[in-house]
Amino acid sequence: MSRTGFIFDLDGVIVDTAKYHYLAWKNLADELGIDFTQEDNEQFKGVSRRRCLELLLEMGNISVSKEQFDNWLEEKNEDYLKYISGMDESEILPDVTKILGYLKEKGIPMALGSASKNAIPILEKVSLLPYFDAIVDGNQVTKAKPDPEVFLIAAEKLGLEPLHCVVFEDALAGIEAANIAGMVSIGIGDVNILSNADHGFKDFTEIDFNFINDLIILLKNKN
Ligand code: BG6
Ligand code: MG
């Protein structure tokens, strides 16, 4: 039995869906007359759909009824689903399949730890679902990142102690969640933004098998 588990965020780590979330929020923001930039979108990464809408409405100083709130949530998601409907393997981020394949070959347990309620259909579209031994998504968590709940459930599902797990994340809130969980955190994206990660890489093309092997040994020997 392996003493090491690898946990991956989905949006912005495995697939480039962060851009579709941005476009869908931008469409709603335009409709509501709220100025919404790519920079604003950074705060939305790793954050639940509901919390994103709260943030957007705060930006526009808009208060709404529960019914209107739920309608806009649905509108954003329907728009997002249109963007992702045509997704296929070509939208897997560079070298992700190479690393997942290497870990699979080595028999290392892998889990998904995502805030998205659309995680399973996306993994199916890009044919990556079979790599994962456990899926934890937005349908199962009650506390959003930076709360470590999503990663702690993932570790539990893999039957591993948190200290034997590593998390790959593109969101500040996700790195914080991994750190609080006592896991090794790997930032994927802008290393200046993700400076609180234990390790940082622009993308998976910068990660080689030696790094993965060293990580496995380090995690295995942690007590
Ligand atoms: C996260 C994204 O993975 O999932 C967030 O980084 C998104 O931007 C969140 O808001 C929820 O996703 P969904 O698919 O349930 O709206
Ligand atoms: Mg993400």
Image (cartoon, rainbow, N blue to C red):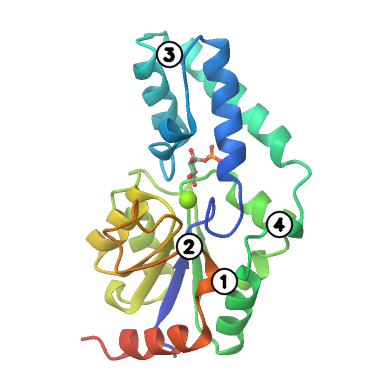
Please tell me in which quadrant of the rendered image residue 76 appears.
top right
Helix, strand or loop at label 2? It is: loop
Which amino acid is tagged 2? Lys
Q: Is residue 155 above or below residue 139?
A: below
Please tell me in which quadrant of the rendered image residue 165 appears.
bottom left
Q: Is residue 206 above or below residue 189?
A: below
- Marks 2/3 in contact by CB < 8 Å: the verdict is no
- Please tell me how crowded label 1 is: few (under 14), some (14-19), or many (20+) other residues with Cα within 10 Å: few
Helix, strand or loop at label 4? It is: helix
Q: Earlier in the sequence, mark 4 or mark 1?
A: 4
Q: Is residue 95 above or below residue 76?
A: below
Q: Which residue is mark 4?
A: 124
Pick the quarter of the image with the N terminus. bottom left
Between circles 2 and 3, the one closer to the viewer is: 2
Kindly identify the residue that appears in the image at 27 percent across and 75 percent down: 163
Which amino acid is tagged 3? Lys
- Please tell me how crowded label 4 is: few (under 14), some (14-19), or many (20+) other residues with Cα within 10 Å: some
**Can see residue 133?**
no
Which amino acid is tagged 4? Glu
Kindly identify the residue that appears in the image at 75 percent across and 58 percent down: 90
Kindly identify the residue that appears in the image at 72 percent across and 58 percent down: 126
Q: Which residue is mark 3?
A: 66
Between circles 4 and 1, the one closer to the viewer is: 1
Q: CA distance from mark 4 to mark 1?
A: 23 Å
Q: Which residue is mark 1?
A: 205
Q: Which residue is mark 2?
A: 202
Kindly identify the residue that appears in the image at 34 percent across and 10 percent down: 61
State left or right for residue 198 relative to residue 85. left
